[in-house]
Image: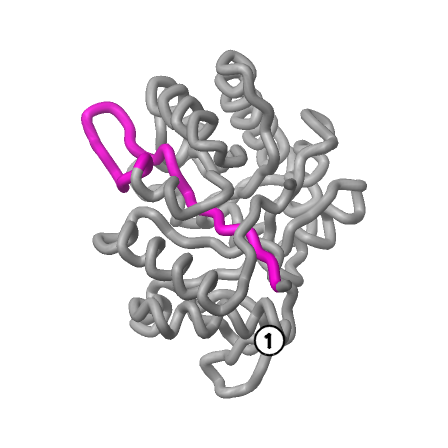
Amino acid sequence: MLRVDLNCDLGESFGMYTIGTDEQIMEHITSANIACGFHAGDPAVMRKTVKMALAKGIAIGAHPGLPDLVGFGRREMEISAQEAYDMTVYQLGALSGFVRAEGGTMQHVKPHGALYNMAAKRPTLALAIAEAVYAVQPELILFGLAGSALIKAGEQVGLRVAQEVFADRTYQVDGSLTSRKQEDALITDPQTAADQVVRMISEGKVRAQQGSDVSLQADTVCIHGDGPHALAFAGHIRRLLEAAGVEIRAVGS
């Protein structure tokens, strides 16, 4: 039977601002990437999101990002490898504290936004992030873009890795995600997204925007939770995958 993990970025509200429908979307996923306060989230939101995930049996992961609340962590910043290491350790420590306080354990780490995309292409940053994860908690699973430098770095330092694919994003011929600055970056039709995911799981391939197939491995699928129709999209994707015979389970289970 085909098997895959469904993950979503959660805990991205802060202060008086509410982003996403975390509690409802948890009904459709198996792993939650919880913001750690740099690109989104705050201590109260982190605690509440951790508590909800544990109550629903959702595997918890840290979602460290760049210190850019205004830009939601999606703008690149010039950072050194040491800075990448330090900010990763800092954010893992913050979320880990809440997870332990609520009696849970963390499953994984997935960098957010620009930090994720930078680490996918820059081996020095990828290695710094992987070393930070290993130093804090070596049994954690490192999520990274399938086939990217982050996956290679995780394997290099001895971490278990999960190769991530995206249900709602289009791909380039080099295996990278189409930039959000382009109009064709997002897939909004659930059936098209589900067909793409099933093919990535069953055949290990995705059709790039340039028309050719790209080989990849799909261990976990990201479904974004901050769009206007994210909840309906997540539910529809899960139902279509299950109808196609795909077992939905957390990557660490």
Q: Residue drawn at (56%, 27%), measured in percent from left and top?
A: 92
Amino acid on which the number 1 mark rests in the picture: Lys
Residue 239 falls in which quadrant of the image?
bottom left
Q: Which residue lies furthest to the top in this view?
A: 101
Does residue 121 appear in the picture of this structure? no
> Which residue is more in the foreground, 171 or 83?
171
- Give above or below for 252 relative to 144: above
Side of 210 where 83 appears, left or right: right
> Which residue is more in the foreground, 245 or 143?
245
Q: What stretch is highlighted in magenta?
A: 2-23
Residue 188 falls in which quadrant of the image?
bottom left
Residue 204 falls in which quadrant of the image?
bottom right
Residue 97 place in picture, x, y as percent: 53, 16
Q: Residue furthest left?
A: 16
Side of 2 where 112 appears, left or right: left
Residue 26 place in picture, x, y as percent: 38, 40
Side of 213 where 40 appears, left or right: left
Q: Which quadrant of the rendered structure holds the N terminus?
A: bottom right
Residue 117 place in picture, x, y as percent: 52, 54
- Give above or below for 140 relative to 193: above
In the picture of the structure, the residue carrying the numbered disc 1 is: 205
Helix, strand or loop under label 1 = strand
Does residue 48 appear in the picture of this structure? yes
